[in-house]
Structure formats: structure tokens, C-alpha cells
């Protein structure tokens, strides 16, 4: 049974606005670079129940209408008392904003997951998106997106490789509750047009609370459903991660 994390955006906006000042006439230049590094511990359930340490990094470059984002992650744990890397990967996203609410989103990703017996998954997608709601361009919005792409998966053991042509559909929601709690949720469904039974779904919810300066407490829950997993593996995996994040 596919479980999805669902959040509904709060459509209200603060009625009060700060009065105009002399500084408004000469605003600071827009921020062109953003970066973050998060370190934490995870509890994973599904194919194996285990604790592990992990790291996540992000680097973003912003232009007037384009945004490029690079991400990387790694998860380090133990199997039978022996240390190993459970999973690691990287991704690159390019977003071009058209006039109004319409945008174009392109993604590339590659990852390895020893627990799911997956040697490598490589995927690339591109397609349109639309911003349904926005109260702040960076922190409060609700986007939907779709696209076409290609996914290659290689497995350990006797499971055959997959070469799939996917239809991707998904949404991204960000909001700030009480001016402190930052919420981010992403959900995507990947449906192969050439082999529908090989669909998979991702859902991730992240909660961040500022501590001191650029240091944040970060809590995330991630769920993945694979309809055709490797031989002997589970359909569902769930990760719960708690840690600290430093934002630049």
C-alpha cells in the first residue's frame, strides 16, 4: 500500500507590511549563491532496520530567471558489525522561470543503495511546472510539475537491469509556520511508459528550526515505494533523520 505524506499550504498572508524607508530605495543586490551542509543520524526500516550517520550538501546558483542546484548525500552504517556505506548519490537540477507562474524543470540524478541491492540508479527528466500558490518566492509556495525522462537501474545478484522511459508527476510545498518552523515537502511518482509495473514513488518531509545564526535543527522523514524491487527485497523503505544544518 502506497503511503504519501500530504500537506496543504496555508493560503493566508500577513496583512501588515513594513513601512517604506530610505533603504528601500537602494535595496541590497540579490543573493546569487546559497549553500548548506547537514549532519545527522538516521533510523531506517524496510529491507533492514538499522541506525546510521549521514551527510547532505547543497550548492545553489541563482540568476534572474534560472536556478541551478547541486545536491549530494551519503549514509554510513554497519552490517553484521562491519562498517559500510549504505547509500550515496548526487543530483543536479536546472529551473527556468518563464513569465508568470510557469517554469521548466530539468533533473539529473545518480545513486547507489547497498541495502536495496541496487548498484546504481541513473535518471534524467525534463518538463513543465506551474506555481499554484505563492506568498514568498523562496519560502512559501506550492508547485506542481511533470515531465518525461529515462531511468536506468542495475542490481546485484540475478535481478535484471531496468531501462525505463518514465512519466514523472509531482509537487513541492514550502511554508513557514509561526515565523520559526520551516516546512518543505516533495512528492514524486515515476511511471514507466514502456513497463508500467516498474513504477516507484518518493515522498519526503523536512522540518527546520533556527537555533543560532545560520545553524538549524533539521528533522526529515523520507518514504520510497518500489513496485518491482530487487529479488528478495521489500517494496517499502522509510528513513527518519535528525541532525543539524548550517546554511550559508
Image (cartoon, rainbow, N blue to C red):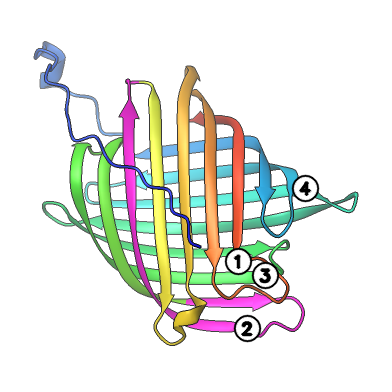
For residue 118, the mark is 3
- Report the front residue among 99 and 180: 180
Nearer the observer: mark 1 or 2; the answer is 1
Q: Answer yes or no: is residue 146 visible.
A: yes
Kindly report the secondary structure that dominates the magenta region of the rendered protein. strand
Residue at point 53% right, 63% down? Answer: 225
* Residue 222, percent from left and from top: 53, 49
Residue at point 69% right, 69% down? Answer: 233
Q: Which residues are magenta?
A: 151-179
For residue 161, the mark is 2
Disc 2 packing (10 Å; few <14; some 14–19; many ≥20): some
Disc 1 packing (10 Å; few <14; some 14–19; many ≥20): some
Q: Is residue 173 left or right of residue 157?
A: left
- Report the front residue among 70 and 17: 17
Q: Is residue 59 left or right of residue 95?
A: right
Which residue bears the numbered disc 4? 77
Which residue bears the numbered disc 1? 235
- Earlier-in-chain disc, 1 versus 2: 2
Distance from disc 2 to disc 4, alpha carbons, whole Å, reads 26 Å
Residue at point 29% right, 42% down? Answer: 8
* Residue 201, percent from left and from top: 47, 63
Q: Secondary structure at mark 2?
A: loop
Amino acid at each position: 500500500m502506497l503511503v504519501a505524506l500530504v500537506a496543504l499550504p496555508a493560503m493566508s498572508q500577513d496583512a501588515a507590511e513594513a513601512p517604506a524607508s530610505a533603504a528601500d530605495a537602494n535595496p541590497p543586490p540579490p543573493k546569487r549563491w546559497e549553500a548548506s551542509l547537514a549532519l545527522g543520524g538516521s533510523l531506517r526500516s524496510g529491507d533492514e532496520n538499522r541506525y546510521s550517520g549521514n551527510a547532505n550538501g547543497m550548492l545553489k546558483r541563482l540568476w534572474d530567471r534560472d536556478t541551478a542546484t547541486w545536491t549530494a548525500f551519503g549514509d554510513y552504517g554497519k552490517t553484521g558489525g562491519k562498517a559500510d556505506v549504505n547509500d550515496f548519490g548526487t543530483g543536479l537540477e536546472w529551473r527556468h522561470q518563464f513569465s508568470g507562474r510557469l517554469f521548466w524543470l530539468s533533473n539529473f540524478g545518480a545513486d547507489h543503495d547497498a541495502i536495496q541491492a541496487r548498484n546504481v540508479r541513473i535518471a534524467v527528466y525534463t518538463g513543465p511546472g506551474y506555481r499554484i500558490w505563492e506568498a514568498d518566492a523562496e519560502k512559501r509556495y506550492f508547485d506542481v510539475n511533470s515531465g518525461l525522462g529515462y531511468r536506468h537501474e542495475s542490481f546485484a545478484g540475478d535481478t535484471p537491469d531496468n531501462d525505463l522511459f518514465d512519466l514523472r508527476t509531482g509537487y513541492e510545498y514550502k511554508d513557514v509556520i509561526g515565523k520559526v518552523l520551516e516546512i518543505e515537502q516533495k512528492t514524486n511518482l515515476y511511471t514507466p511508459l514502456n513497463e508500467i509495473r516498474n513504477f516507484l514513488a518518493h515522498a519526503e518531509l523536512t522540518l527546520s528550526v533556527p537555533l543560532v545564526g545560520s545553524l538549524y535543527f533539521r528533522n526529515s522523514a523520507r518514504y520510497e515505494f518500489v513496485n518491482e524491487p530487487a529479488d528478495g527485497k521489500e517494496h517499502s523503505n522509510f528513513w527518519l533523520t535528525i541532525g543539524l544544518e548550517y546554511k550559508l
